[in-house]
Image (cartoon, rainbow, N blue to C red):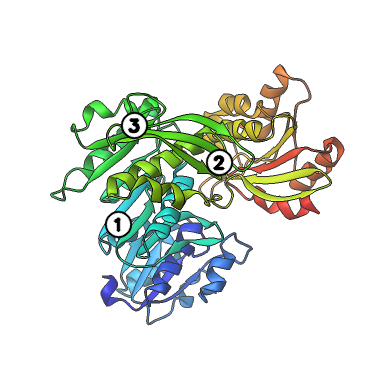
Amino acid sequence: MLNDIHHVFIVGIAGVAMANIARILTQMGKHVEGSDIEASFITDSVLSESNIKVIHSFEADKLPHDVDLVIYAASHGGKQNPQVVEAEQSDIPVIHQAEFLAMLLSHFTTSIGVAGCHGKTTTASLLAFALAKLSADVSYMVGVSEFNHQFGGEYGGNEYFVIEADEYGIDPPDNITPKFHLLKPDYSIITNIDYDHPDVYETLEDTKKAFKKYALQQLQTDIVLRQLVVCLDDKNVSQLLPSLPKGSYITYGTSNKADVQLSNITSTKKGTSFSISSTYFEITNATVETSLFGEKNALNATAVIACLLHIGFDMPEITQAITHFTGAKRRFELLGEHDGITVFDDYAHHPAEITATIQATRGRFPKQRIVVIFQPHTYSRTAQLADEFAEALSLADQIILLPIFASARESGEHQTISSETIVNAINKKTSGKAFAAISKDAALIYLDEIKQKNDIIFTMGAGDVYTLARHLLA
């Protein structure tokens, strides 16, 4: 299809994945434009620097008549969006974002999917960054607007393509088919499996079944090179291994049973240092230095190393390639420092991610106070994991909770869960440690009252909490 289309229209083009798709298609020589609401987005620079026109309207008559393809996703009405309806009535080909990405994989010699409930954006970004250092013929589609001062979508050639394999549903609640079930990359990394997205998966067992299906479908092919790279440290991932064909996967982790083992994990002022050993690849105590912080990121880096070793790159060139990766946007992102107070932003929106970020912060700043401004993301997730959120956030010294950021498919009406539920659970154990702010302005006022010199302050969550940063620094 890509060879025959020239003009692509993307509905909801300011979303991170959509903006990166738009950039890739533009670099492939296609004329791309799209529609979205009139607002400030984290992807504004992606679209503006790629000279992509954005129409601030979803009205049907705003759809250009000479479009060859319309790409849409679940947001902004999904298939009921007026422009999507207009395209179908006008016999213009319409394709869902997930279907388009599945089709896109076929244009590359070697494709690599990165799956996992946590860490897949950092892992995919690092893999794309390393491959770009190791080979000039690399393209990627990562679920972030930027990493290492480069955009999350790039068409640099047809040899390698890195893509995040997203376990979320195609169009909940109407279609909860996991997006990554449409993908069949040549290699796949699976970082972990956890319970998330309660609007798609009723239980952890349902999530594990979805990952099992994703893993098995990678192996149903005649291509010899298909291979899974999986984290042996993760209990839920390791439980899948008996159901996979022997020889179909490589394991990594701190376990001495792992094919690629990391050890001697040490926090440094610049990041994390650790050793890699592998009887599988005949490596003994190779030293790795990364600019990322925390044990979870050391595991993410090891996933990339294991994948690159299996593809055929040598350990010395891999370690050199990953050294200067500083991270993806909104992943432990340093925003600024003033009067001894340091401000970071992080996308963590699940208890496991919050725990990992705070623990990594403790390792990096062991003597400083950690203050977290957290914005819960979706009512369904908050309700299902309220106790786990309270436990994870309690690891910080002071916690400010914003009101819940609802998804486009949720409404605040008739919801029994609120941020106060989590605050009350925290304060039962440590009185006064947590505060429920009724707005962002209220959060800033309260922060001004409690802040201390040398504090480490995080804005945290998957909603729009990152917009607080400029006001907080000011």
Crowd class of label 3 (few under 14; some 14 to 19; many from 20; radius 10 Å) = many
Of all residues, the one furthest to the right in this rendering is: 449
Which residue is label 3 attached to?
A: 208
Residue 194 vertical position relative to residue 114 in the rendered view, above or below: above
Residue 391 vertical position relative to residue 260 in the rendered view, above or below: above
Q: How many marks?
A: 3
Which residue is label 1 attached to?
A: 102
Choose between 303 and 1: the one closer to the eye.
303
Choose between 388 and 82: the one closer to the eye.
388
Q: CA distance from mark 2 to mark 1?
A: 27 Å
Splitting the image into 4 quarters, where does residue 291 fall?
top right
Q: Is residue 110 left or right of residue 271?
A: left
Does the rendering let one see residue 213?
Answer: yes
Crowd class of label 1 (few under 14; some 14 to 19; many from 20; radius 10 Å) = some
Of all residues, the one furthest to the bottom in this rendering is: 66
Of all residues, the one furthest to the top in this rendering is: 429
Q: Amino acid at mark 2?
A: Thr
Which residue is label 2 attached to?
A: 378
Tag 3 secondary structure: helix
Q: Residue at x 39, y 51 (%)?
A: 317
Circle nearer the N terminus (2, 3):
3
Picture quarter with the C terminus: bottom right
Q: Position of residue 447 (x, y in %)?
A: 81, 40
Q: Mark 2 or 3, which is nearer the eye?
A: 3
